[in-house]
Image (cartoon, rainbow, N blue to C red):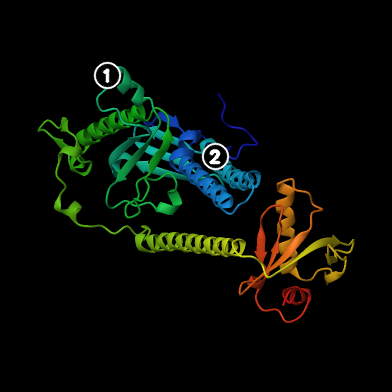
Amino acid sequence: MNYIHNQDDFATEPVRGLPARLPEGEFVLWQGAPQWRSFAKTVFHTRFILVCVTAVAVTRAALSLAQSTPLGTALGEGLVVLLFGAIGVGILCLLAYAVERTTIYTITNKRVVMRVGVAIQKTFNIPFQVIDGAALKLHGTPVRKAGQAQRQAQKQAAGTLSLTLKPNTSIAYLMLWPHVRPWKMTHTQPSFRGINKAGDVSMLLRDAFRAYAEVEASRQPNLAAHLGLKTSKSNNVSVAAETEKPSDALKRPIRDPHAVAKAPLMFAASLAVLTVIFVGAHQWAKFHSDNDAATLASGITPVFTQDIVIETAEDDAITIRDSATGDTVTVLPPGSEGLLRGALRGLGYTRAMSNTDAGTPYRFERYEGDGLYLADPMTGRSIRLNSFGPVETGALATVLAIGL
């Protein structure tokens, strides 16, 4: 299959996924790319986001119902939250698909090559000589006590294969993200994220590394210690690096010049979490405060009531009239009295959502010591107009003086 096209962004690649032709004696053992479904689930955490969005939508609908909002309106508010959440998850899935289409992981008999980047392509060459180990994480529930068939099926599952580099080797975490092991910022671990048949790929990498180490150790005996192997007198490789204790040099902490400081990131994350908690607590308290005020008002007989009708002219002027006498209570000129207009618009929207007769009069209700309310007898909603603050002039000042 020809992977080189004149219109392709990667037309300059002499070998697919590689920046140059491999030297003599080196050949490709495996090439692959992230599976976008697995990548979206494990890197962008789309399942967790969907659970959070669903919880927020249910909470929003429950709070609306607790505020005596009609069932249809409450469900609509919850569905809006779900809709925006679904759009966000869809964008993340598209990004994961773009990562799948533009990423190529390569294993040769001497190195690992990673061509990554959706907008800006970068290629990372990682020779076996700087690899200190590897870790495999399969996506899904681990099978500890299972038969041969289950273990074989698990090896075919998607997973993440992470490489541990020698202490004197570093790659900038942000340059390689998201193709890194999460939170390993002090010493970056390049990773094959969301690859299919991760178990088979890990065994292929292990065998390739061991074969490379045997050949290099036979050529250069002093290289065996550098590669983490111990050899017999005949230079035959007998035990792999993971069985050896680290030397004193490896025990000393080595500072990665490209490491991302954890403290500022943790501080920023904590600040974001505290902001969300603070805003949520404030909104919760405000909701209960408004709800308690409405409950208090509904349990007390108003000292003054006046039924009103709302008339909107073509120039956007709004006239409030007494429904019994037809007298003008006040007029809202075009483009003015935004607070009062917003209150009227909110009550009208609730009526439209609940299919209530739009011609039914609204009502001004004044309660002793609690101010003036604009109420809708049909939907049960009411807005405390005194909450808008002191107003000395204008239509709102005229309205606030009603019933005094």
Residue 19 visible here: no
- The residue depicted at 74 percent of the width and 62 percent of the height is 363
- Which mark identifies residue 317? none
- The residue depicted at 85 percent of the width and 61 percent of the height is 311
107 left or right of 218 in image: right
149 left or right of 275 in image: left
Q: Name the residue under label 2.
A: 93
Q: Is residue 151 above or below residue 339?
A: above
55 left or right of 138 in image: right
Residue 251 position, x and y percent, is 18, 53
Q: Mark 1 points at which residue?
A: 147
Q: In which quarter of the image is the N terminus?
A: top right
Residue 211 position, x and y percent, is 27, 30
Residue 216 position, x and y percent, is 25, 35
> In front: 306, or 314?
306
Q: Quadrant of residue 118?
A: top right
Q: Quadrant of residue 375?
A: bottom right
